[in-house]
Amino acid sequence: MKILLAGPRGFCAGVNMAIETLETAIRLYGTPVYVYHEIVHNKHVVDRFIREGAIFVDAVEDVPEGAVLLFSAHGVAPEVRRVSAERRLQAIDATCPLVTKVHLEAIKYAKAGYRIVLIGHEGHDEVIGTMGQAPEAFVLVDSTEEVDALSFGPDDMLAYLTQTTLSVDDASRIIHRLKERFPQIVGPPKDDICYATQNRQEAVRILSEGADIVLVLGSQNSSNSQRLAELARDSGIRAFLIDGANEIDPAWFTGSETVVITAGASAPESVVQDCVSWLQARYDAEVEERTIRQEEVYFPLPKELRAAATAAQLPMA
């Protein structure tokens, strides 16, 4: 068996920033630190922080007045910030800057009077936060069929935005159809799909060409991880989205396959290495790193947390 370790894989800059933010908040304020929704969509990361004293909530009202509340990497609606302020919560914003970019675009278009078509998956935390920036302005689509069902006319002022973790190919098809139906539609000057999502998809697309199986490390509620598995399947390759080595089924292998292993942007490298070790132990697998692109993006901690850590003379993580 041959293992091709896809690069880049795993944590992106936004996930690194969110995790470091929560680590620093726990060191600075002690526990519990409350987190609005999962800090990132990964079971291993969430379970680790639960053990360390973080409490994840789906409603701000579940947080005691005056407590520390961290907003996850996926971003939140202004209403969440308003209720947090009413409850005198010490809010720390760990929203990924690339999601914040989409929020600012939404606010700009809404103020200018545009109706905004958001390309994304209903119910995803990021989509909820983005649409919350201007609820009356948005309509959500996730397929060309839904674009065809839109009832806008040629005189409507329209703009489009995208969830940052979509399939690049799917988003491109939907944008193309929007422009066909509504030639007047405008979009952001720079692609909303994040660099890490695009890079991981590119690596899977290239490496799958010579592979028999693709293993994607990531949780089922991770949109970018789901897209990686779908991308491989669209190429006719068997692909499995798993949280860790304990979910590997020996029936998937004969021992002579070429296996690509990658990880979604919220999956820790430790789970990747566990899977490599599992395959090496059973199939004496040979491992080869294949890096398609280098990533050097870094996002600093939220300003309010950096200031508090400096005042407390707390060494940064």
Image (spheres, rainbow, N blue to C red):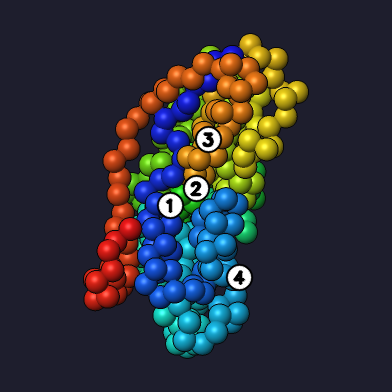
Question: Looking at the picture, which amino acid does disc 1 mark?
Answer: Val
Q: Secondary structure at mark 1?
A: helix
Q: Residue 103's x, y, as percent? A: 41, 62
> In the image, what residue occupies the spot 35% across and 30% down?
293
Q: Residues within 10 Å of mark 1 (few under 14, many from 20)?
A: many
Q: Are marks 3 and 1 in contact (CB under 8 Å)?
A: no
| Quadrant assignment for the C terminus | bottom left
| Left or right: where 127 falls relative to 294 | right
Query: Which of pointers 4 and 2 lies earlier in the amino acid sequence?
Result: 4
* Amino acid at pointer 4: Asp
Tell me whether circle 1 and circle 2 mark residues in contact (CB < 8 Å). yes
CA–CA distance in space, label 1 to label 2: 6 Å
Distance between the alpha carbons at the discs numbered 4 and 2: 19 Å
| Residue at which label 4 appears | 58
Type of the residue with mark 2: Ser
- The residue singled out by tag 2 in the image is 266
Residue at image mark 1: 15
- In depth, the one of 38 and 231 nearer the eye is 38
Taking depth in this image into account, of 103 and 299 the one nearest to the observer is: 299
Q: Identify residue type, mark 3.
A: Val
Q: CA distance from mark 4 to mark 3?
A: 29 Å
The residue drawn where x is 75% and y is 23% is: 251
Residue beneath disc 3:
272
